[in-house]
Image (cartoon, rainbow, N blue to C red):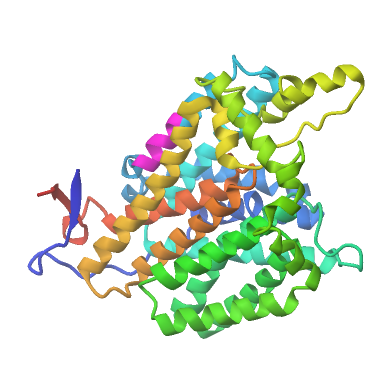
Amino acid sequence: MGEWTVPSPATAAVAKPAPAWDLLLVCVAVYIATSVGRIHQLFPILSLFKPALLSAVMAIGLFVLDKNRQRRLALLRSRTTSCLIGLLVWSALSVPAALNQGLAFHSWTEFARTVVMFFVVASSIRHARDVERLALVYFAVTVVYTGVVVSRFQLGAEDWRLGRLYYYDANDLATLIATAMPLGLYLVLAHRHLVLRLCAGAGLAVLAVGLIRSGSRGGFLALLAVTAFVLLGFTTVPARARVAGLIVILAVAGTSASNRYWTQMQTIIHPNEDYNATSEAGRLKIWQRGIGYMAGNPIFGVGIRNFQVAEGTISPLAKLQERGIGVLWGAAHNSFVQMGAELGVPGLLLFVGLIAGTFRALRRVVSARSRAGPTRDEVARLAQSLMAALVGFVVGAFFLSLGYADILYTLAAFSVGLAKSARGDPARPPLRFSTVPAA
């Protein structure tokens, strides 16, 4: 293993200005707006142009034709990419042994598309400024999605929380919001342009209202985890600014929350009063059954996206159907249980390794940039913002089935791309961090 070292003053050179937007980066931005922000589902007229498919195909084609040395696939070698490739291969091997092979194969092709676009997104990044641009797109489309949902789905006296929406349900939306908030906070506290900072602040207010209206307990815990990380681990922004920003966000969230919302949140510390702890259809029982599927099929699991099939066919409750009693073919409601049940122990380890590898890469970026100069370095701030976003995802995903969601793999692509750009272009040794054997 190696460690980052800083070029000597004799060999250091002044970095060139960040490259401007190009067509590949624009296509990647549109892809993120559709895969994460689901912008085409908010405004159906956009679906006529097939923006998701068109942007993905164009991005892949432009990437293949691009000769920029900063966009070579070889630069993406990391623990994250190794685990992702392993996860793709292992999920393919699970298809023949799946409970429903047709569903598994279709799901694998969708996951393969996600993996391909992970490499395209990460490779398209040439400079930390590109990560900032794409993070801005991620944040902006999340704000747009949340704003449209909040404006179109009004809450009445009986409906105190959002329900099924366009693509994400209320719980999924809350986790998406928790991942976007740190990126918005980065724009507010660290960006150079005042207008963009003010817009980002307004966007954070929209996200805070959306998270509260989702009524999601998992989203609430994700927000608390992000808040704790920002306060304790966000070393690249002065503590005074961090506290001020979070106070404003929490104040907006608190003033928009109803009594019914806080009653619902209290069930987190009183789980015995909640159906998730008492019902066979509650999360605890589902997780127990999911662990049982993994124990019964430890190598390949029940097949990619086959958790619900397992619930309706091989679970202990499935026998009730013989007596005419309906059984819910429910989701895992936990991404780690989902991956273990569907892809076995190896799949779960690869999934955990992917997340851990992403955190590790970002931590190395922060550490290297801190040694290279002031701790309030722009790249280090961006790395810590992505770490906070991943914290929000991990906590939210503990209560949701998001094992194959574009949210995770987009954030991982940003992280791998940022780590690559922080190393610099190998074609220009004076501008890069080099690796030497650790002492």
**Image quarter in which the N terminus is found:** top left
Magenta residue check for 43: no
Query: Residue 266 at x, y = what percent?
Result: 70, 63
Q: What residue lies at 22% left-to-right and 72% top-to-bottom?
A: 373
- Closer to the camera in the image, 383 or 249: 249
Q: Is residue 371 left or right of residue 91?
A: left
Closest to the observer: 125 or 37? 37
Task: State whether the magenta stretch is mostly helix, strand or loop.
Answer: helix
Q: Quadrant of residue 318?
A: top right
Using residue 308 as the reference point, say whether residue 292 is left or right of it. Answer: left
How many numbered badges does the structure rendering display? 0
Q: Which residues are magenta?
A: 79-86
In magenta segment, residue 80 = yes
Residue at coordinates 70% horizontally, 54% vertically from top-left? 171
Observer-nearest of 319 and 123: 319
Tell me the residue at 72%/25% (across/down).
309
Could you say which quadrant of the image residue 263 lies in? bottom right
**Location of residue 320 with respect to 277 vertically, above or below:** above
Residue found at x 73% / y 42%: 282
**Residue found farthest to the top:** 96
**Residue 424 showing in the rendered view:** no
Q: Position of residue 391 (x, y in %)?
A: 49, 57
Outermost residue on the left side: it is 10
| Residue 121 visible, this orientation | yes
Q: Position of residue 235 (x, y in %)?
A: 36, 72
| Location of residue 315 in the rendering, given as x and y in whole percent from the top left corner | 71, 23
Task: Give the answer, above or below, for where 222 lies relative to 296.
Answer: below
